[in-house]
Image (tube, rainbow, N blue to C red):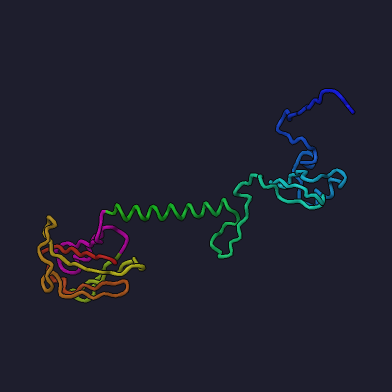
Amino acid sequence: MATGTQVVIGFFPASASPVDERYLNETVAWADEAAVLAGIPIGKRHDGLTVRIGVKDYNFLADLTTLVEKRNTIQRAVDVPIDDTGDLFDATEVETALAEVKTLADANADAITALGTSKYNPYQILMPAGNIATKIAGATFAPTGWATIAQSGDYDAIITHTLTDRKVGFVNVFETDSGDRLLSFDKGTAYTGILGGATTVKIEGLAPTSLPIRVELIFD
């Protein structure tokens, strides 16, 4: 029976380099599983031996021929492919897919913010005093860029809007003074009729010439 004091000696690596030289293929990661199996003789493998393939760590199983991805391997999002069965992304990996989602989320947030801070609600068209041609020639839009206006017949105007995903709910037509006070919005005075289409509104009878006109469109 042996006697004496048992001595346990430990060690720690002095650098970030792996202790086991088989972890890398010389100084670089192994290209693939076949390269590992060809490069490390079976007699030099052991259960749990860790090797680096590409950007991931793998362990040998007990049969010494099977490699499985190491559970605690840290992967970058750019290295993780996606199975885009719904064809939702242009991206093929997680990081770029997340960037696409972020871009869409930012655009939606900007649109929501714009709705909450819009100065104009409802949409307005302001027309100066004068005959129908003068009114249409001097028409201004608030906000801009959402519609156009054109003359139709002697006294009618057709408004064509670009908000194709929305429908016009209400239309108001007012006569105003230079201070934008509302003087009349009676049918027969400020206008004689309103006809609506999918993307158009026809205002009939814009006959008064002495006063400006304000048209308001409210969308559903």
Residue 145: which quarter of the image? bottom left
Q: Position of residue 200 (x, y in %)?
A: 29, 72
- Tally of numbered discs: 0
Q: Is residue 135 magenta?
A: yes
Q: Which of the two residues, 145 or 171, is positioned nearer the viewer here?
A: 171
Q: Position of residue 134 (x, y in %)?
A: 19, 65
Residue 40 sits above or below residue 199 on the image: above
Q: Which of the two residues, 214 or 37, is positioned nearer the viewer here?
A: 37
Tell me which residue sits at (77%, 41%) in the image: 24
Residue 137: which quarter of the image? bottom left
Question: Which residues are the magenta region?
Answer: 119-146
Q: Is residue 188 magenta?
A: no
Tell me which residue sits at (29%, 54%) in the image: 118
Q: Residue furthest right?
A: 1
Point out the image quarter for the N terminus: top right
Tell me which residue sits at (76%, 45%) in the image: 48
Q: Position of residue 179 (x, y in %)?
A: 12, 55
Residue 181: which quarter of the image? bottom left
